[in-house]
């Protein structure tokens, strides 16, 4: 048989962005943008997670980065949020809400994100995992007001109180200090009671840590997702700092933009787009002994890299039924069966290995392939076969040449 041409096309590196769109908010509303990216790493294909690309500030960025990394926590310090006392803080007060009281939304909250083009839904989770910043005292109070029970004034701020766990950091002067506490999931309120009265107190800047759980990027469609999550601030709110310390704003909205840059790449070896179909062992058995070949075939290897979902499709210069065909100069036609084998790590829509799976013109059976992890430069095969009965018809005219063009498509737009 003569050569016939197999061409290929695929969508190259595809960008996936996940963001969180925000609803209309009150006139007074703080916003914080959170961004993250997923790029497949050829040197570490088993790690398939978003990387937080939000500009960080405060404790995790400047003082205890290793601790924050171990806790998967990121911190942001903001001057836009402030809390001011509306009444003096009494010494040794019994109601924890009448002083330095802290309760933040440490439980996980689901955030629905929507693909802007297709409407496909995914879920991001977020929680507040730390709190701190700078407190300042007024009216003549000094940092020593926090001394009690034989402990230095800085003990609770440096090492924490209740469920709040200090990171061992403190920076202070006579009337102010900067501190930070990490906060475990579903933590209760924490409070510090002074041993002397505080006429005035202020929190600014405020610093919070957050933790994210993002969807598996390997199972997400290419494109951009958007959504948002809003927390209330003030007495009884999500960020509840008691009844004395009142915020300058009552809403904090997080707007997320998570980008995934999927990779889909297919490479044929030089000359791999021209296929010659041969019997097992060549034509000698038929030429010498007249033994009909069981089939004519060629297994063409290629190399594939994929970090996201894709489908495969077939196009033909000659269609016979649900597959391609070959034709000779006399107009005789025979069907050509086309199949694909993919490397370990790429599965079909049912989670099964892909081994000589037929490619059909209607796309049935190859509508979805998905990686279990990033597959990078792994060998795969296309299989081209003319079956026994069709070979028999071809051999009725020895020396005849059958040709055809097959287009195999790897499509990341699933």
Image (cartoon, rainbow, N blue to C red):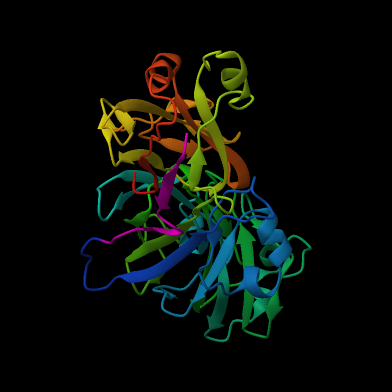
80 on left or right of 91: left
* Range covered by the magenta-colored residues: 1-22
Residue in the foreground of this view, choosing between 87 and 262: 262
Please determine whether, in this image, residue 298 is positioned above or below residue 205: above
Give the total number of marks visible in the rendering. Answer: 0
By secondary structure, the bulk of the magenta-drawn segment is best described as strand
Q: Position of residue 367 (x, y in %)?
A: 35, 34
Q: Position of residue 370 (x, y in %)?
A: 47, 38
Q: Quadrant of residue 239?
A: bottom left
Report the residue at 51% width, 59% height from top. Answer: 102
Residue in the foreground of this view, choosing between 281 and 99: 281
Please determine whether, in this image, residue 265 is positioned above or below residue 361: below
Report the residue at 72% width, 70% height from top. Answer: 169
Residue in the foreground of this view, choosing between 113 and 171: 113
Q: Classify the position of the C terminus by image quarter.
A: top left
Does the magenta segment cover residue 14? yes
Q: Position of residue 226 (x, y in %)?
A: 32, 57
Residue in the foreground of this view, choosing between 123 and 45: 45
Does the magenta segment cover residue 29? no
Report the residue at 28% width, 61% height from top. Answer: 22
Q: State whether residue 195 appears in this view.
A: no
Q: State whether residue 187 appears in this view.
A: yes
Q: Position of residue 109 (x, y in %)?
A: 42, 46
């Amino acid at each position: 048989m003569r050569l016939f041409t197999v061409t290929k096309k695929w969508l190259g590196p595809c960008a996936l962005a996940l963001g969180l769109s925000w609803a209309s908010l009150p006139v007074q509303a703080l916003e914080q943008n959170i961004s993250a990216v997923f790029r497949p790493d050829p040197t570490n294909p088993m790690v398939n997670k978003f990387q937080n690309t939000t500009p960080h500030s405060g404790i995790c960025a400047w003082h205890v980065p290793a601790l924050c990394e171990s806790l998967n926590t990121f911190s942001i310090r903001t001057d836009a949020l402030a809390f001011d006392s509306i009444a003096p803080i009494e010494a040794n007060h019994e109601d924890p809400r009448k002083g330095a009281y802290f309760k933040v939304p440490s439980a996980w909250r689901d955030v629905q994100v929507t693909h802007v083009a297709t409407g496909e839904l995914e879920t991001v989770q977020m929680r507040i995992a730390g709190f701190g910043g700078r407190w300042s005292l007024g009216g003549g109070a000094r940092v020593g007001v926090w001394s009690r029970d034989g402990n230095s004034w800085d003990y609770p701020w440096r090492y924490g109180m209740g469920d709040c766990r200090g990171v061992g950091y403190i920076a202070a002067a006579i009337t102010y200090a900067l501190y930070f506490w990490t906060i475990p999931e579903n933590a209760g309120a924490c409070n510090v009671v002074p041993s002397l009265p505080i006429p005035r107190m202020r929190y600014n800047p405020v610093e919070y840590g957050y933790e994210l759980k993002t969807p598996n990027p390997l199972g997400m469609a290419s494109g951009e997702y958007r959504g948002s999550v809003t927390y209330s601030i003030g007495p009884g709110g999500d960020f509840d700092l008691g009844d004395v310390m009142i915020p300058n704003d009552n809403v904090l909205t997080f707007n997320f933009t998570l980008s995934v840059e999927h990779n889909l790449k297919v490479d044929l070896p030089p000359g791999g787009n021209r296929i010659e179909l041969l019997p097992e062992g060549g034509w000698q058995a038929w030429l010498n002994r007249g033994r009909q070949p069981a089939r004519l075939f060629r297994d063409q290897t290629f190399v594939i890299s994929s970090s996201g979902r894709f489908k495969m499709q077939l196009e033909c210069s000659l269609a016979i039924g649900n597959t391609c065909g070959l034709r000779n100069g006399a107009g005789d036609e025979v069907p050509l069966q086309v199949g694909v084998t993919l490397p370990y790590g790429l599965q079909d829509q049912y989670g099964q290995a892909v081994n000589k799976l037929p490619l059909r013109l209607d796309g049935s059976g190859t509508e979805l392939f998905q990686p279990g992890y990033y597959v990078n430069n792994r060998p795969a095969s296309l299989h081209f076969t003319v079956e026994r009965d069709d070979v028999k018809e071809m051999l009725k005219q020895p020396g005849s040449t059958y040709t055809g063009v097959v287009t195999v498509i790897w499509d990341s737009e699933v």
